[in-house]
Image (cartoon, rainbow, N blue to C red):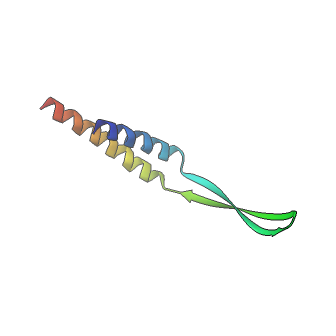
Amino acid sequence: MRTLGIVLIALGIIMMIITGVNIATKKNVVDVGPIQIEKRQNNPISWSPIVGGVLLVAGIVVVLSGNRKRLA
């Protein structure tokens, strides 16, 4: 469980810093012999930094709850 908590904390911090990713895709529009025309399109994926904060808090809770089980 501690490993899961650490992963959630790291993912939360990364998602709070980086709020989106841009994925570029290529599509062949025309392919006639030696002539090729490609179209590049950007597909943005974005999320709210609040999601990163929720993951960060969840990771802290998981790590702390794992420590309490060891102490009891």
In the rendered view, tell whether residue 8 sits above or below residue 33: above
Position of residue 15 measured from the top left corner of the image (x, y, whole percent): 48, 47
Which residue lies at the image location 56% right of the left edge and 58% below the top edge?
A: 45
Q: Residue 70: image x %, image y %?
A: 17, 31
Q: Position of residue 63 (x, y in %)?
A: 28, 37
Residue located at (86% from left, 66% from top):
33
The residue furthest right is 34
- Residue 31: percent from left, percent from top: 81, 68
As displayed, is residue 55 above or below residue 36? Answer: above
In which quadrant will I find the N terminus? Answer: top left
Residue 62 relative to residue 23: left or right: left
- What residue appears at the point 41 percent right and 47 percent down from the top-left corner? 53
Residue located at (28% from left, 41% from top): 62
Quadrant location of residue 2?
top left
User: 32 or 23, which lies in front?
Assistant: 32
Between residues 65 and 38, which one lies in front from this camera angle?
38
